[in-house]
Amino acid sequence: MVRAGRRFLSSLPALFGVLVFTFLLMRVLPGDPAVFFASGPNAGKEEIEVIRKQMGLNKPVPEQLMLYLYDVGSGNLGRSMMTGQLVTKDLRERLPASLELTFTALLIALVSAVPLGVLAALRPGSVIDHGVRFFCALGVCVPTFVSGLLLIYVFYYLLGLAPDPTGRVDIFASLPPRRTGFLLVDFLLAGDFDGWWAAFRQLVLPALSMALFVVAPLARITRASMLVSLGSDFVRTARSVGLPWWRVVVTYALRNAILPVITIAGIVFSTMLGANVLVEKVFSWPGVASYALDALLSSDYAPVQGFVLLMATVFVIVNLLVDILYGIADPRVTIG
Amino acid sequence: MTSATLRHAGWILRGNPLTAVAAAGVFLLTLIAIFGPWIVPYDPIVSNVSQALMPPSAAHIAGTDQLGRDVFSRLIVAARLDLAIAISAVGISFAIGAVIGAICGYTGGRLDRGVGRFVDVVMAFPLFVLAMAMVAALGNRVENIVIATAIINLPFYIRFARAEVNVRRNVGWVEAARACGDSHLSVVLRFLLPNVLPAMAVQISLNLGWAILNAAGLSFIGLGVKPPTPEWGIMVAEGARFISTGKWWLVAFPGLALMLTVLCFNLLGDGVRDILDPRMRT
């Protein structure tokens, strides 16, 4: 825990850096949002001036930065010009949708990549091994948005198995009372199994298309790290004393091979946060990324800054989790 | 290249014909990018509404889009723009990253730590989100896609060049060059950089595929390239509207083009790495 706390403190400067960076990015560079939000291209000078004042754009840049930092510190990320709501409120409403999607995708990816990697490592050079390598080589080449659209074509248009690929639930369906914001959990808590199934069906395709892209690095690292641990002395010893093979593989070899997989899973998670933007657009998923994208295309500063900051925070938290998992997977790490 | 290296390369290519195929693919792609506009059967921009949304046929082997433009012709013409974006982005970040990284690795100390911290901040971040924010802030133009892609690639090159130079900073020939009166700058630029370039060439090839995917992703969400310019990402975006009515060719063919291009660059990168550094072979 002490270690995790120290890690958290050491990631604060990075968070601060991200904060300043996004601020500079959005404020100093060209493009005057006041003109954009004025009534039209022939809006009067006074009108633009009023909007500038309202947005605090007439103050010197360092002062704007201080004001921004103060606001963020007091939990105020500003107001979105698009929705007219507080950015924190918008983000809080939409974050569960994004997290539900990302975590499901990560789960799918891990559940398929780890066994694939283990199988490939057990029989290096076999058909399975080559199959996994081929799949991995292809997997990193197909853009997420293309695989998502092709999945829609196959499962919605051709087979009719998947529901209409827009949003988290059918527009006519009734939502469960909001407790966690994760629809799968909320439906379960409400005891509405039909609703759960409907939400699950909506979630499968976007989660799959996101998972497809990240299975490759995970399977590859599992294979490499399993090869090392299968060749080690303790596995030979475990085999020679006649332990059942699944115990040798799972308890001894896999447990020792899992550390690099956790590291890569952390990195993969960051990639997925980025891929969220593409997948949410393809499936009209009402998450934070599509919110930020809409804001971005209409030069609405506050939501984009809030989104970037949120992503950085999520990323720091996930890194902490990875650290804690490290300690669980390998107790030696915590001592060191 | 010495004859031993060439022989080694030949041995690798025989043992790994995929690398040869990938190299041929990249060569073909380059030809298409250069001569594309002259070899296409149809004009990629002019619309022909009477032929809209036709599935693949003998006349239009990849079908036509919602304005009746030939998808195949657009794919071919788009190759130049897609490759140009990726190559210039990777070129920029390679040139800047190699020099910054080499200087950091050579001098060490406070500058090294400062840059290292900055690189950590940038890398610890969903890079696509960063690129998105940059394009939006700089302005919605193709040049800015190049700049954004270059910046998100930069940390990898800085880190790579830094590590490679750092292990070589105290070797004999660096000391010899210093003793002969070469300045620090000259040691870095004339001796250390050329030494780490081969290793970095592998990074370039692997990175090109990644850069192509990033650039296509950016134009897919509506940043940078504007219609009617043919570009793979934007072609997928335009085709996306018709996918739930079964017009698969609008998405599948640009997707295939992206996939094959990235695959060729990745396989080539792996192959080049095997030739240059047999120990890294997986």
Image (tube, coloured by chain):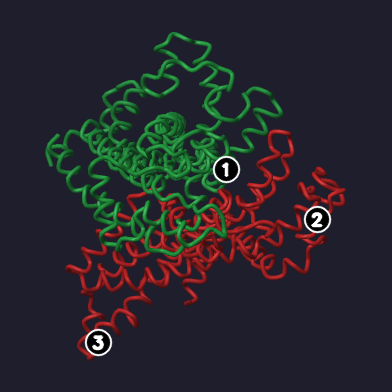
Which one is earlier in the sequence, the residue at label 3 or at label 2?
2
Above or below for B123 versus B185: above
- For residue B10, what is the image quadrant? bottom right
Which amino acid, by three-letter code, is at mark 3?
Ser
Which residue is farthest top? A191
The residue sitting at 76% across, 48% down in the picture is B65
Chain letter, green in picture: A
For disc 1, the marked residue is A145
Which amino acid, by three-letter code, is at mark 2?
Ser
Residue B139 image offset from top left, x and y in percent: 50, 61
Give SS at disc 1. Answer: helix
The residue sitting at 25% across, 68% down in the picture is B166
Q: CA distance from mark 3 to mark 2?
A: 61 Å
Q: Image check: B190 left or right of A143?
A: left
The residue sitting at 24% across, 83% down in the picture is B184
Q: Chain of mark 2?
A: B
The residue sitting at 87% across, 52% down in the picture is B59
Residue A27 image offset from top left, x and y in percent: 37, 59
For disc 2, the marked residue is B47
Chain letter, red in picture: B
For disc 3, the marked residue is B183
